[in-house]
Image: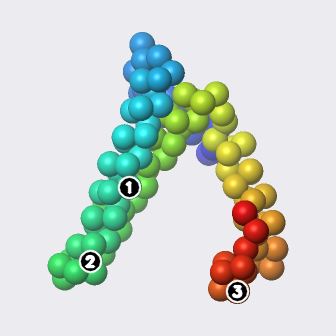
Amino acid sequence: MNANEYQQLALRTADPTADRARRLLNAALGLSGESGEFADAIKKTEFHGHQLNLPELRKELGDILWYVALACDALDLEMAEVMAENIEKLRRRYPEGFSHERSINRNP
């Protein structure tokens, strides 16, 4: 499945009556909440002695993707476009791949 196909299929479960501002607000709050749930699962592993719960992390990543799709829709963007632009930014920032030196002395 490609990113734009995912976006189209995911949006079938979004509220069709929500205007742009409501979709964007839902996406922003949803991304914050789901990212928090992802981080909480990692916290439980690191500080509470839990086993790393890969199925839970996978589910949270899926939920995060759903909200990314909603945000892209609210902003009239295609996920594939956003992904490609991000890769180009990373290529400029780290042309030889990640390095601590480039991270400290990087161009925006």
Q: What residue type is labelled 3?
A: Glu
Distance of label 1 from label 3 (alpha carbons): 28 Å
Camera-side mark, 1 or 3: 3
Residue 95 - label: none
Question: How many numbered badges does the structure rendering display?
Answer: 3
The answer to whether residue 64 is left or right of residue 86 is: left
Compared to residue 82, the image places residue 104 above or below, namely: below
What amino acid type should be assigned to the residue bearing mark 2? Thr
Name the spot of residue 101 as percent of width and height, x first.
70, 86
Q: Residue 39 appears at what percent x and percent y? A: 34, 64
Compute the Cα span from label 3 to label 2. 30 Å
In the image: residue 27, left or right of residue 38: right
Q: Earlier in the sequence, mark 1 or mark 3?
A: 1
Check disc 1: other Cα within 10 Å, few if <14, some if 14-19, many if 20+: some
Q: Mark 2 points at which residue?
A: 45
Quarter of the figure with residue 37 = bottom left
Please give the name of the residue rendered at 55% of the width and 28% of the height, measured from the top-left corner. 74
Mark nearest the camera among 2 and 1 is: 1
